Amino acid sequence: MATLTVNVDHVATVRQARLDTEPDPVFAAGLAELAGADGITVHLREDRRHIQDRDVEVIRQTCKTRLNLEMAATEEMIAIALRIKPDMVSLVPEKREELTTEGGLDVVKHEADIKKATEALKAGGIYVNLFIDPSPAPIEAASRIGADGVELHTGTYANAPLGERRDVELGKIAAGASLAASLGLKVHAGHGLDYRNIEPVREIPEIEEFAIGFSIIARSVIVGMERAVAEMVELVR
């Protein structure tokens, strides 16, 4: 049975729109756990556009489940992770001008740097996950690097129109999950998944965990955080 980590970044997005103290992603993380989330995800971006350093520190202290820290493979972020000690780090690509992460980490192109970051984090006792496209080359590179797991980028699938094109993208995710599992990697999935499109992905047996944020936070504005999380937990399981 797959598990769910809830990304609370966009609670902080609303807060930062006014540079205020509310809504508080720390409080949102607690509500998500009460509603059945198996973990909390936060992305500490280099530009600090939403989650701030203090958010990560306080959520680390108060999280009752597991904390997944998404971050770029930079010296600054590696130092922060080694100090805060999240349960898991997910290395992701970043562009300052992007609205959201636009694709998977180019592990093949940056293999040496990512391997160095992975080794440093693992030496600190942190599980290392690589956010990558569901293609053979980056999955095989993740295995060579020694990552513990991969998070398969589901955004292309989520954005594809219903029908043959989406089915093709779903097939890529299924094939990627199978390859990753065969190489001994734990398989996570996320990006763009919502209350409608998650069901076919949920049926892929190798996927052990989903990381979902935006759709849950968007729904929570209407129905409340606990209900929004509980509904997604039910769908995932």
Image (cartoon, rainbow, N blue to C red):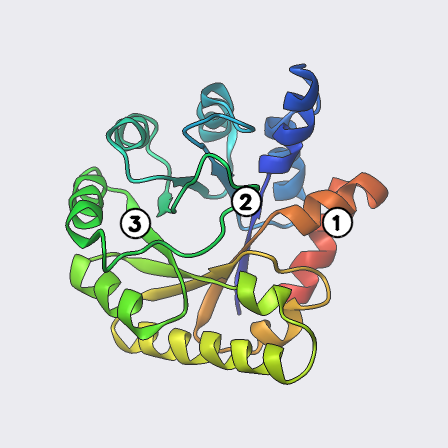
Residue 237 appears in the picture as rendered:
no
* Residue in the image at 68% along x and 58% along y: 232
Disc 3 residue crowd, few under 14, some 14–19, many 20+, Cα 10 Å: many
Relative to 80, residue 196 above or below: below
C-alpha distance separating marks 2 and 1 = 21 Å
C-alpha distance separating marks 3 and 1 = 28 Å
Residue at numbered disc 2: 100
The answer to whether mark 3 and mark 2 are in CB contact below 8 A is no
Q: Report the disc number at residue 228.
A: 1
Q: Is residue 172 left or right of residue 22?
A: left
Amino acid type for the residue under numbered disc 2: Thr
Q: Is residue 231 left or right of residue 43?
A: right
Disc 1 residue crowd, few under 14, some 14–19, many 20+, Cα 10 Å: many
Relative to 21, residue 171 above or below: below
Residue 110 appears in the picture as rendered:
yes
Name the secondary structure under disc 3: strand
| Image spot of residue 145 (x, y percent) | 18, 57
Relative to 168, residue 36 above or below: above
Q: Residue furthest bottom?
A: 164
Q: Report the disc number at residue 212.
A: none
* Residue in the image at 74% along x and 57% along y: 231
Sequence-first disc among 3 and 2: 2
Disc 2 residue crowd, few under 14, some 14–19, many 20+, Cα 10 Å: few
Residue at numbered disc 3: 128
| Image spot of residue 84 (x, y percent) | 34, 27
